[in-house]
Amino acid sequence: MTSVLYHRNRSTPATRTPRAGAMILVAVLPLLVGCYSMRPVDLSEVSPGEEVVVHLDVDASRRMSAQEGYDIRSVPGRLESSSASSIVLSMPVGRRVQGVIMDDTRRLFTLDRPEVVLVERREFNRNRSALVGAALAGGLIWGVLQFSGGGGSGPDGGGEPPPPAPSFRIRIPLPH
């Protein structure tokens, strides 16, 4: 027994528009991935629990480098507390496997205020994210046009086929 597969004729054109879900994903992706930049802030603007990068002066850098055994010029971490004389940062020091911290062990660093040269906070950058979103949307539209046949690079369907590519023959005489 043979089975026959019947197709219904559809009145819709062959080119399809991209799905709404894909378009929404492209629109939301820059917000999820986001482009962030570090912006210098005053320490009074940072509340406890925020992630910051604290840049150290030369003396504090030498002291901490000697304690830790490697060169430290800045300390990335979470601000735990700040007072008029010092700040306390917690920095993740857990095991890393392929760049991912496996346990949430944190180490506290206490720094005197004069040792802090600059404090930077990671902030969402709208301009970069908009640029990434526009590039993603443009790439998606280009891809849809290329794969749906709307790119205009194929034959028009009503003309003659293109001529065959020229062939080259090289004759090498062989001794008899």
Image: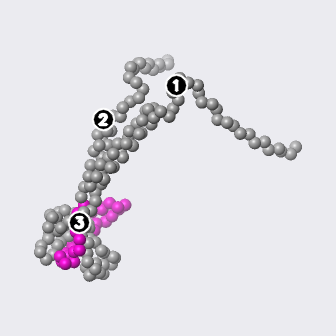
94 is within the stretch colored magenta: yes
- Give percent across and percent down for residue 67: 28, 80
Which mark's residue is nearer the viewer, 2 or 3? 3
Which quarter of the rendered picture does the C terminus lie within?
A: top right
Q: Nearer the viewer, residue 157 or 108?
A: 157
In this rendering, would 80 be left or right of 147? Answer: left
Q: Which residue is drawn at 15% across and 75% down?
A: 86
Q: Name the residue under label 2.
A: 20
157 is within the stretch colored magenta: no
- Give percent across and percent down for residue 105: 24, 66
Marking on residue 49: none
Q: Which amino acid does label 2 sit on?
A: Ala
Q: Can residue 52 be seen in this view?
A: no
Q: How many marks?
A: 3
Sequence-first tag of 3 and 1: 3
Q: Name the residue under label 3.
A: 40
